[in-house]
Amino acid sequence: MQRVTTIDAELARRGAEDGERAAQMHQQIAALIGADPAALAPWEEHLEHCADVDLAMAAVADLAAVAPADTAAALDDDAVARRLVRLLGVSSELGRHLAAHPEDLTQVVREPARMPAAEITADLCTDVGAFIDGSGFLVAEGDPLAEGDPLAGADRLRLANDRHLVRIASRDVGAIESIDIVDDIAAELADLADAIVTLALALARAENPDHADARLAIIAMGKCGAQELNYISDVDVIHVAEPAREGVTSQQAVMVASRLAGAVARICSAHSGAGSIWQVDAALRPEGNAGPLVRTMDSMTTYYRKWAKNWEFQALLKARPMAGDLKLGQQFCDLVAPMVWQVGEKEHFVAQVRAMRARVVDLIPAKEKDRQIKLGSGGLRDVEFTVQLLQLVHGRHDEKLRDRSTLGALKALAAGGYISRGDAERLDNAYRLERLMEHRVQMFRMRRTHLLPADDRGLRRIGRSIGVRSADQTREVWGATTRAVLRTHNKVFFSPLVEAVARIPSDEFRLAPAAVEDRMRALGFKDPKAALGHIGALTQGTSRAVRIQAQLMPVMLEWLADAPSPDRGMVAFRRVSEALGESPWYLRALRDEGAMAQRLATVLASSRYAVDMLYRAPETVQILAEDDLRPRPGSDVAREMTAVAARHETVEDAVAAVRAVRRRELFRIVVANILDKTDCLETGRGLSDLAGATIDAGLTVVAREAENPPRIGVVAMGRWGGAEMSYASDADALFVVEDSSDPEATSKATAMVSRLRNLLALPGPDPKLDLDAGLRPEGKSGPLVRTLSSYLGYYRSWSSTWESQALVRARHGAGDRALTSTLLEAIDRLRWPDGGLTASQFAEIRRLKARMETERIPRGVDRQRHLKLGPGGLSDVEWTAQVLQMQHAAELPALRTTSTVEALDAALDGGLMTEDQHDALRQAWIHASRMRNAIVVTRGRASDVIPTGIEDLDAMARIMGLGLGSSETMVEDHLRLSRRASKVVEELFWTP
């Protein structure tokens, strides 16, 4: 009893679920082969790495019962024992076959190596008795009917198939790492399928006396065509026939070939005492199951040229001759190949491929979705569709990608730079693992299935066959693998770059030099030779970066052409690419990161302002890969700026780090503006928040240089105060320092503010930020910084009307909020005076406005084209809003806002203007603000005057979303809106 318990425990330690039963099997085997039943034999050590110990022990016992000597000899050879134990533990069906046909144990004993396809065919010919007859066709020996058993030949073929499956499976499970040879195993299974179909056709010819009238080619499709077949899988085929001799019509040949094709399908799929092979599926033929089983070459030509759908050409990617008349089969493949490599440019091709993949997933029953190895999300089909889409899009002009196998094509795609090496490696590893799991699932009962087991024992068996120990670990491996596939699939399969490349006609990849120049000119390039020079500089050579550039270039040209200045964009693309040429993320991101490449092309060909930032700091381009381009909250940016500044010791370095964050966020805002991701008001708020965050962080930095630095508050004024900054705006500000017993507090604060102003105004990679204190008490002649009590005293006794008006836009900007809040509360009486403006104050404001328009509009400038000071311009609208606020905010609290637009809305709600007046002022202000920003974005420099050059105007119109050739419309819209607004300003501002 103790002996059995020990054996029981040892077998359980090796993985037996029923240790007692396994011990009984051990005793039985030992008795049959003459081994010591009291101890584990050396071969039983291999059970530890066996998929199902209980299954293996039972199968060895069955085999030993019918062939004890052969079994003992196999188990005595350690390498053979390893293969045999693993085979019997993974496949109950092959175990039963060996028990029924122990002579096939020689297939496990033989040295594991791939058998050449010709040898497999020759071996099956011997089994079936096939030979080349006088008409040149391979036929079975004699007439099976003469033997009285028409099924004998088919049964011999079925048994031969099982014998070769034992051989192939033994090599598979016996490998050190089965995952490394999964593609080689799949290819040999396809070789076996070719031989099976070849011999099934030979048997079919023996059944049909008139077989010599038809040449029949059987074309492998799907996994068999790709030579990546499963152990048990439908073999997808297409049949092509032609008359074999003179006097036979095409119709007669098709009739004979149809009988032959039908017989082949029957032989392969029928069940008998010898078992079955697999189904032959001709559903991928023209018209599917509704179409004729066999067609002639002429019929095939007509169908594929006129009627075939895009998915049919995708399926033909895998087509190859497998049996029958191989020459005819190759003619068919040569016929359809050019069509296969043109389908990628057909209208809606990419969208249709994506939709087809989505439909497949939707049709999976809910209870199977998480277990579907082949069709489920993150499964084999996702890898295959990803690879096939890239092949069909890029293989039009790169013949190296025209590989039928998934893994071979994936390797070529990575070598060509069409997919990152990291993504290719992830897909390769996942595909191998999923194929291995699919093989192991099918091998268990040698049945066609693509589902992981639902029960823990089944999952444990699959897990142990791939190197993990439990059902839970199997689930974890499966989940991690599908997630990795899904992430890469979604990134590559849905990349806009793929769709854009697909839209480029194939012939444009092969234009002659003169035709290329014409094409470039047609795209809108004014200097095609210069552009081609830039293209050549980026695409000449053999490096991986050059290959990726060559892949990107055709679609980049299309995208550049859609923007205002293709030539300037091409120059910029070259400069940015050369600057970032050593950065591994740059080209990879352009290829893989969603819409980044298209965004970059649009930005480069639209904005000198953005391009200048990229020239100075090319790494800023990473912003284009982000999903959300809207301005970040100012508080988030301020925290980041403070954190990065803290990592630098010197004030100069710390402020430079703050400015680097500002540069990145400024680029984000500009890009969002160019790509129409934000409106004018959101842009203004984003720029204003960014200025506040920069000044806030900068104050913290410069405080390091002062001993006991005083508290400083910054009041935002002007457009900063109104959260309406443009790209050209200075940050108008008042600087207030706390009242302190320290006599040096004001001088310290002045030094800190001066230091900050100088550091933010230095030339650098980002546009400078000028802190303008011109609106402070006494203007430029007054002190830069005042104490809180000084401000309060000044505004109490000396403030002018224009200063009260300037304070309408005053709000907290940066620094100490308690100081600014106290000051702002004190000045409310000036900007929201009880009783409103006096007549003299109103008259003073009007005089000042008139003088500004006279003095500040440059001589010779058309007033109608001045966005700020022209009639109905920004100043008109803002001053109108401000006087309404000063007149009525004491009674209407909603008017107490620093925002022009909010003030106009509140004035409408308060009954101070009509809806028409409100709409006129609001639309004019927004349109002028957008044009002002567009001038800076397109030209790279500020101006309040609408340019006259057609190129600048067209670029502005494109930035404003008006489309090509809309510059006149843009200017006419401004003139119309400003005229409307000017009339309202006359009514509300100038009329006493």
Image (cartoon, grey):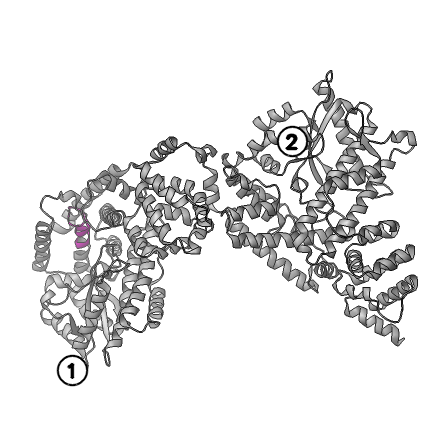
Q: Which residue is mark 1?
A: 743
Residue 924: image location, x then y, percent: 23, 46
Amino acid type, mark 2: Gln
Residue 849 lies in the magenta-colored region: no
Kind of residue at badge 1: Pro
Q: Secondary structure at mark 1?
A: loop
On the rendered structure, is 691 left or right of 416?
Answer: left
**Viewer-proximal residue among 586 and 384:** 586
Q: Residue furthest bottom?
A: 741
Point out residue 750 in the picture as x, y percentages from the top left corner.
17, 73
Identify the mark nearer the N-term, 2 or 1.
2
Residue 285 showing in the rendered view: yes
Quadrant in which the N terminus appears: bottom right
28 in relation to 915, above or below: below
Which residue is denoted by mark 2 in the rendering?
Answer: 330
User: Disc 2 vs disc 1: which is toward the camera?
Assistant: 2
Judge left or right: residue 929 versus residue 441.
left
Q: Residue 660 falls in which quadrant of the image?
A: bottom left
Observer-nearest residue: 978 or 216? 216
Q: How many marks?
A: 2
Q: Which residues are magenta?
A: 868-879
Q: Quadrant of residue 842?
A: bottom left
Residue 109: % across, % down? 81, 54
Residue drawn at (15%, 63%), measured in percent from left and top? 775
Q: Is residue 419 left or right of residue 631?
A: right
What label sits on residue 970 in the rendered view?
none
